[in-house]
Image: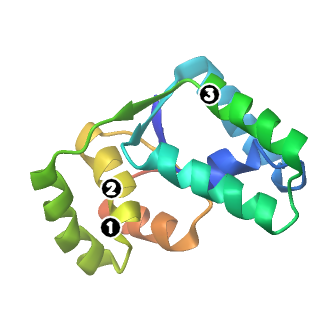
Amino acid sequence: MFVVDASIALTWCIDDEATVATDAILHRLLLEGGIAPAHWPLEMANALRLAAHRGLLDERDVERARSIVLGLPVVVLPVETSTALGLVAIAETFDLSVYDAAYLDLAWVRGLGLATLDSSLARASTDRGVTVIQA
């Protein structure tokens, strides 16, 4: 099991974004399962909306992407208010958004790797001692 952020999951929804490496991570996800913080579905939905707005996805592609996201073995975990407020310090320390700090903290607390394409989040993960699952 590992933490999945939206940047990696989006590659499985947009054909032009997929690579052999991201497909390998998808295969691993299908075997092991993954987890994500509570905002992950909102981040995925917003990214799909933006991709459609930018002309990267048509209506049929968006429906296909929704099916893909719904089928991913990613367990979305709640984030308590106290945890969310504690993420501010992590975000400050590693110069991340609080949203990205949530992925980092979840991986660190659970002792799991983190799959991301976000270079800032990957760098912060390495600095925090979290294994980055490479794409």
Residue 70, label in figure: 3
- Mark 1, Cα crowd under 10 Å, few <14 / some 14-19 / many 20+, is some
Seen from the viewer's position, the closer of residues 7 and 59 is 59
Answer with left or right where residue 36 lies relative to residue 88: right
Q: Secondary structure at mark 1?
A: helix
Q: Position of residue 80 (x, y in %)?
A: 16, 45
Dividing the picture into quadrants, the one containing residue 79 is top left
Provide the secondary structure element on which disc 2 rests: helix
Q: Which residue is mark 2?
A: 102
Circle 2 crowding by C-alpha within 10 Å: few under 14, some 14–19, many from 20: many
Tell me which label, 2 or 3, sits earlier in the chain: 3
Identify whether 69 is placed above or below 9.
above
Determine crowd level at label 3: few under 14, some 14-19, many 20+ residues with C-alpha closer than 10 A. few
Return the x and y of residue 11 as percentages of the image width and height.
74, 49
Query: Is disc 2 in contact with disc 1, using a CB cutoff of under 8 Å?
Result: yes
Query: What is the distance, in whole Å, between disc 2 and disc 1 at their CAs?
Result: 6 Å
Q: Residue at x 38, y 39 (%)?
A: 112
| Mark 3 element type | helix
| Disc 3 residue type (three-letter) | Leu
| Residue under numbered circle 1 | 98
Picture quadrant of residue 78: top left
Left-right relation of 94 to 45? left
